Image: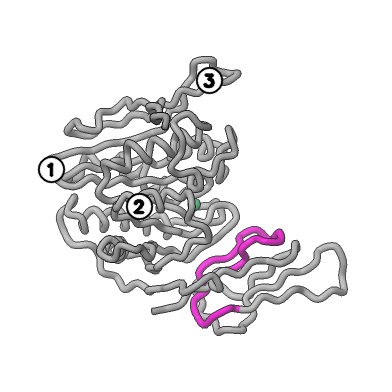
Amino acid sequence: MTLLRDNPITLTVDLEQEGVQHGFMKLPHSHDASAWGSLMIPITVAKNSTGPTVLLTGGNHGDEYEGPLALFDLANQISGLDINGRVIIVPAMNLPAFRAAKRTSPLDGGNLNRLFPGKPDGTVTEKIADYFQRTLLPMADYVLDFHSGGQTLDFVPFCAAHVLENKSQQDQCVAAMRAFNAPYSIMLLEVDAVGMFDTAAEEMGKVFISTELGGGGAPQPQHVAVAKRGIVNLLKHVHVLEGEPDKTPTINLDMPDGRCYVSSESDGLFEPCVELGMRVKKGQTVARVFDPTRTGTRPVVYESPLDGIFIARHFPGLVKMGDIICVVAVEV
Ligand SMILES: [Zn+2]
């Protein structure tokens, strides 16, 4: 067995130092335009006293902006907050993807949220994953990773936890999700959890929550507001900030099985037939897909697989075969 190499990323901040520091995760990246250059991934660390460590991340996918907006804003505000503990803020985890406004990295095609645990001697994206896996995740007690629909999906604003084998860990994740207090709270069934940051954190025993807050690759003010409020609520829940989290009513959702996801079985022109957040009945038409190459053909009709709430849809007007076109979750 060969020992893992050290990760090439160095920090320009000291994670153990008291006070607020803004700096970079510096990843050497040699390329045509910069022989000895580095990727400079922004990081803020704020530490005071002995409370827990909270890791707040966004930009895991580069075309999802709602969480990053809240996190860049928090980094500016945090010196004015009276914290007890350590808050580590990385608003743009996959910086090359974020700068390119793409889900995946333009450098290596890497989808960061499918490449955990990463590799210290792998691609750029694998090196970023490895740094979170072996350096930042182990020091965190609580992890909040922001997602939203990006360019291809749109979601009702929800905070999510997962069903876990360890039920006391699951209970803590659910409590954190409820404290975040998004308009919707969901026990999220992932399409494929292998390689996700979520899975890496959960397997390490961390209290982990994530979000989906709108989408379409264009942030809406109400979704950014949910992200900002949710951060403060979580920090209060874990006593890094004083006070009680908001207790605005949330709609609790569950996803019993894979039927919740409806995929398109053809390429074509996508007609969503219900609005996000609407209650739907099993068998109700939720979408139609037209063949754009000819007139006089009937659209393919997609029905709701369950009684529930229409929580997500394909965003662009054209779909490809295999795309998720809608997601229905069950109200509990
Ligand atoms: Zn995402």
Q: Residue at x 37, y 74 (%)?
A: 252
Asked if the stretch drawn in magenta spans residue 309, the answer is yes
Label number found at residue 133: none
Depth order, front residue of 301/77: 301
* Amino acid type shown at disc 2: Glu
- The residues colored magenta run 304-326
In space, the residues marked 2 and 3 are separated at their CA atoms by 33 Å
318 sits left or right of 295 in the view: left
| Position of the N terminus by quadrant | top left
Q: Which residue is label 2 attached to?
A: 203
Q: Earlier in the sequence, mark 2 or mark 3?
A: 3
In space, the residues marked 2 and 1 are separated at their CA atoms by 25 Å
Q: Earlier in the sequence, mark 2 or mark 1?
A: 1
326 sits left or right of 60 in the view: right
Circle 2: is it few (<14), some (14-19), or many (20+) Cα within 10 Å? few
Q: Which residue is label 1 attached to?
A: 50
Residue 318 in view, yes or no: no
Q: Which residue is label 3 attached to?
A: 30
Depth order, front residue of 34/72: 34
Question: Quarter of the image holding residue 175?
Answer: bottom left
Q: Whole-percent x and y of residue 56?
A: 33, 46
32 sits left or right of 219 in the view: right
Q: Is residue 7 above or below residue 323?
A: above
Q: Is residue 22 above or below residue 196?
A: above
Q: Earlier in the sequence, mark 1 or mark 3?
A: 3
Q: Whole-percent x and y of residue 237?
A: 21, 58
Q: Residue at x 48, y 36 (%)?
A: 126
Q: Whole-percent x and y of residue 281?
A: 55, 84
* Amino acid type shown at disc 3: Ser
